[in-house]
Amino acid sequence: MNPDWPLFTLKNDLINNILAYASDINQCARHITTQIREIIGTRIVALCERNHNGSYQFLAACPERKGELFKQDEIARLVECAGQFERATLIEQGKGEAGYWLLKLDLQQSFAVPLQVGGESVGLLLLLDLMDAPGSRHILEALQDISGILSLVLKNSYLYRNMEELVEQRTRQLQESEMRSQIILQTAMDGFWCVDAKGQLIEVNDAYCEMSGFARNELIGLDIAQLDITQTPKEIEANVRNILAGKRLRFETTHRQKNGDMLAVEINAQLRPDSENKEIIVFLRDITERKRTETALIEALAHYRTLIDTIPDLIWLKDLNGVYLSCNRTFERFFGAREADILGKTDYDFVDADLADFFRAHDQNALYEGRPCINEESVTFAEDGYHCLLETIKTPVYDAHGVPIGVLGIARDITERKQAENSLKESEKRYKSAQRLGKVGNWEYNIATQTFWGSDQAKSIYGFDPESKDFTVDQVESCILERERVHQALEDLIERGIPYNLEFEIHPISGPPSRIIRSIAEVERDAAGNALKIDGVIQDISQQKKAENEKLELERQLRQSQKMEAVGQLAGGVAHDFNNMLSVIQGYTEMALEELDPTLPLYHAMQQIYKASLHSADITRQLLAFARKQTIAPKVVDLNETIEGTLKMLRRLIGENIALHWLPGANLWPIKIDPTQIDQILANLCVNARDAIGGIGNISVETKNIFLDNTYSHSFPGFSPGDYVRISVSDNGCGIPKEILPRIFEPFFTTKLVGEGTGLGLATVYGAVRQNEGFINAYSEPGKGTTFTLYLPRFTDITKITNLNTEEQVVGGNETILLVENEEAILKMTTILLGRLGYTVIAATTPEEAISLVENSDQKIDLLLTDLIMPEMNGRELAERILSLRPEIRYFFMSGYTANIIADQGVLDQGVSFLQKPFTKKELAEKIRDVLK
């Protein structure tokens, strides 16, 4: 057989199949694959169509059962490789990528024939597992010819099928679009009309029916003019002509609703595209609410503008470059220009450069901080020249995306507020000053919240720092000694309305160890009578109490003085009468003794009576001396000479075990006194000193000129200012207990046993001193000794000393002195003296307090002035302790004992600075300057 004959036959059959099955590509593919397999010796023939995405779609295979083979991944990979050939190609097993997949599928030589039209791949023909390999060349040639025809078949089929699908798709889309349009028109919230060329409604949707209140059948056929009440028929006719001419119109108008109400609508009208210029479509939007909103917004804006312009504060808005965007009426006054003239300009157009720079800097600061910033600025209004202080708040303004777009400014005139604040501060300052000067503080206790508040002075009274936040109920109560009494008083105030007015002692947490305060409080109640708050005041009455105690002491001293005076008057009267009786007794006794026989027992009895009368006369003379009524012969004397004349007698009185030291003062002033009284005074004082020593000891007698000033006389009642000659008699005996000291000058008061004395010794001394217008003072420490100091007035030719209150000029200083004295009266007097001399005084009543002050204070101390004899430790020990802490401090001692007696006791070294009590202001000033020089 001619080998080309079967191929020729195949070509003819292919053409017939194309004509017969062109409309059904799948049936056509089945016939083609069958014919090719019958003509060409191959096991499988398959036809695949190329999709638009480049993949291959299996159409048919022969035998048909082999179609399942093309569901495998290996066949798909083989088709993918074969599809890359540009012409018919023989694939050999194991050669190339396509040959690899043949091997995987266990297929022999195969043909791949790409199907192309105009260079476009439209499919692939596969002849798998050829049975006649030698005839492969002829087969390839035949297949090359067949591929062109087959490619056209696939291409035409693809186009035919796509055209049908496209027509069907377009038809379906058009139907869906029309349906959606109808649905949209009928379900739209906006109204819809379709109007003919005459302006009559031919179609409406449900939305417009609902908007207008008319039914659809009522609207169809109506003229627009029957619904539009804003436009005239001519205006409506003109609109229709314009739309038919191709214009699109958009405007607002008002329609009539069926119930007669007005309906504001927005009209959008245009020519219907498919109507051949005969129909108009109109969309109607109900803008009634929008119109109401716009009206309300306009009114709100007007209200807002009125509000902004009415506000007395300055309000403005700038952009990032400082250009004004808006401002209110008050701000217009500041620049003296209308808002229209301000907008678009900057501060530099209205104020000087310095002030404009100031404004601009604070604008930038607000933008930099990203928050409202406050500053104060002093300005002058350009409109009327009003000058004021403004408090300005500048706030950055942002857009919806958080980007800064400008600065909002609000400025308030705070001139009056500042004046009020200053007045309030001044008032508060006066209030605090009044509290401080009056030592009065106020406090509040909120019963509901259980919170406590106290003023600065209240805190100070309790020893707290006024700036401290720590001032609680517990802290206050910890300072109160009588807590239970205070609590009970507050309960009585709250529960029973009993007035609260207490005095009690507190121990402040700092400052003085104790204070006496008066606390007064009242309750604030609500309308129902429930206690809400306690308001109270406290006053530091320590000084007042101290003054009251001093007053009581002065009254006691006055009563003592009056008592002594009364006792003296009584003693004088009794002594006078008793002397008369003694004269009678002594006269008759002497006469009886002259007549009696000395050997008779009665004679001896009469002698004892006579001796008793003489002794009674001595007692009477002592009483008269105390009463200052004994007969005296005063004359001007030199006290040193008078005392020196009695020393021998005094040494015999005190005995050899006791050393008598005589310390005469230089250039002693003259005094006027009966010399025998000096003898009497010294004898009584030395005998008492001898008895107090009771063994070996020392007695010192010292004289000195002294001036007593007003301060000293005020501190010690009974003293008068002036010049005096002082006599000091000191011993180192057992001393006098404090409870006995006030009574030592009373007649017949004695601590001696019965038979050891009458107790008139010190009474006699007291009477003699007072009879000569002098004063006496006793200073004693139990176990340390006693000093009696007598002051006898200086005698001058002037009958009356004038201006006794004039003090000698003394030299003071500005140093700081630590004063230590356990006698409160002397501490107070000395503090006053030092203050008047210009010194700063730190006072302490005990050595331990003085040491604590030095340890806990950094204040400079120049001088330590301390009493030498004190209960806790003596002055020398205190000085040693102080100097160990502050070696640079100078010091000197003071005492009621004379320096010699103290030195003899070993308490004070010879040559150490010392000042004897009592001392004058001049003596104190001179001693301080001498120590500090």
Image: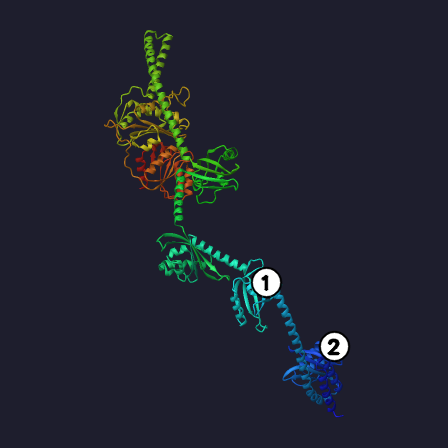
Residue under label 1: 208
In percent of width and height, residue 159 lies at: 66, 80
Does 887 sit above or below residue 59?
above
Within 10 Å of disc 1 (Cα), the crowding (few <14, some 14-19, many 20+) is many
Residue type at mark 1? Answer: Tyr
What percent of the width, then of the height, locates residue 520?
46, 35
Q: How many residues crowd mark 2 within 10 Å: few (<14), some (14–19), many (20+)?
A: few
Q: Is residue 88 left or right of residue 631?
A: right
Does residue 619 appear to the left or right of 92 in the view shown? left
Residue, disc 2: 68
What whole-number distance in Å separates the C-alpha atoms at marks 2 and 1?
Answer: 63 Å
Q: Nearer the viewer, residue 589 or 651?
A: 589
Which image quarter holds the N terminus?
Answer: bottom right
Residue 266, how many percent across, how many down? Answer: 54, 63
| Label 2 or label 1, whichever comes before in sequence order | 2
Label 2: which secondary element:
helix
Q: Residue 791: image x %, image y %?
A: 31, 28
Report the number of discs: 2
Nearest to the observer: residue 810 or residue 517: 517
Residue 88 in view: no
